[in-house]
Amino acid sequence: MNVIELLRANWWAFLIGIVIRFAFAPFTGHPYDMAIWVTTGRQLYLGQSPYSPYDHLGQPIVWGLWLWLSYIVASIGGFDIRLFALVVKIPLIFVDMAMPFAILHILRRNMVTFSRTKLLFRVLLLNPVGILISGFWAMPDQLAILLVLLAMGYHDNIRLVIVLLVLSIALKLYPIVLVPAFVLVALRGSFRKGIILSLGVVLGIVLVSYLPFILMGWNEEEMSGVLSSQSARSFGVLSIFYSMTLLAYHLGTPEFVTLMLRLDISLWVKFIWVTVLFIFWISTLLKLRNGSIASEFPNDFLLLLDLILVHYGLWMAFAPWVSEQNTYGFLVLLLVKGSVSDQAFLGVHFTMSATVVAYAVHNLPFFSFFHLVYSQATIDEWNRLLSKDRNLKLAAIGILHWVLLLLGIEKLIEKLWRSSKG
């Protein structure tokens, strides 16, 4: 199918997806994040550092540039927050709608046999998680993940991969946990490629992070503070540690609460994901070096897909903080995996998508997204049912999400290790 045929076959899903996203775009936004987006745009508009306010951008300046342009547009004739919310979301919505086309192009370029084209299209266009992130939340996760997907599709072009990964990391930071997977595949080709890729990404991130501060005369320590704080965050959202903390508060057991609070300030717990990823990475590298992982992965793209899913999944399973939007890339990759090989991963995709949506609805709670148009009293009234027994519901959903995540990771690793045993 070409682009025209795909649109004809899925026109209704494309239409529903884009209408829903744009219909709510001007009227919604996460109260905390939207406030930071406005502050960032205003600070840059005034020629000041967007990292000076207490609540500030949590990544390098790349995303801030679009916030600056959005602020300029929304300030024509006096600042309009609804126009700002709409303009900020425009590229995110279009990236969201372009995602299925990009994935099919990538699969074809890497000569990967795939099925369930209509399913892939319709799920990506209508997945409530994607709609929530781009149409309601205004988070650049879809853009960051699209860059990762393109890097996967052009993994044989090291220079392009470096550029795409650096931009992805600059947008959201967490895609840095996927870089080791790219390095493993590069090392499978040659040691030199692996080193070039590693150094290129590191130097690129340093450049993107600090060059604006040097050029604008801003305080470079502000960026250092951002990077350090984001790398060792307190327990939060879909992290299993946060789910256990919420459960402890719900049960009201003093010893349980104290234990979780102590773990929350423990540095080794916050970086346990690094240890887990390192062990997996070294084990996989040794198997790749002796040629034991090859029979089931004659195509480097398929190997890269599995490796990225495992790296992504291990980070989500053991990181101290995993936001709802951070899960979307993993869900997209699960959908791709289920479309090109094992159908069981489609089930994991749908069940995990349901847990993410359920968590997001109860976490904020949902009607708080409408703070741009309704009073806080009205929002509180609408959120009353969602707020009831909130800690217990979030803990239960978070633990279920974690179990599903581990099941998916186990299945991926089992395939890797099975192939290594011949």
Image: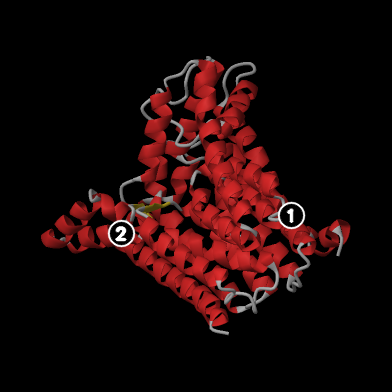
Which label is found at residue 115?
none
Query: Which quadrant of the rendered structure holds the N terminus?
Result: bottom right
Measured along the vertical axis of the image, is residue 178 above or below residue 92?
below
Describe the element under mark 2 as helix, strand or loop.
helix
Q: Which residue is outermost to the bottom?
A: 422
> What amino acid is found at the position of numbered circle 2 in the picture?
Phe
Secondary structure under badge 1? helix
Apparent side of residue 228 relative to residue 185 in the rendered image (left or right) = left
Instruction: Using the image, determine if residue 343 lies above or below residue 372.
Output: below
Q: For the view shown, which residue lies furthest in the left direction?
A: 254
Image coordinates for residue 274, horizontal then vertical, percent: 39, 56
Spot occupied by residue 23 in the image (x, y as percentages of width and height): 65, 44
Foreground of the two, 387 or 73: 73
Q: Residue at x 47, y 60 (%)?
A: 356
Task: Find residue 22 and report its horizontal and vertical position in percent.
Answer: 66, 44
Q: Name the residue under label 1.
A: 102
User: Considering only order in the chain, which callout, 2 or 1, is on the residue closer to the N terminus?
Assistant: 1
The three-letter amino acid code for the residue at tag 1 is Ala
The residue sitting at 76% across, 63% down in the picture is: 110
Checking the image for residue 241, the label placed there is: 2
Dot 1 and dot 2 residues touching (CB under 8 Å): no
Query: x and y percent of residue 143 in the render?
Result: 62, 45
Query: Is there any visible trace of residue 221 in the rendered image?
Result: yes
Color encoding of the figure: secondary structure
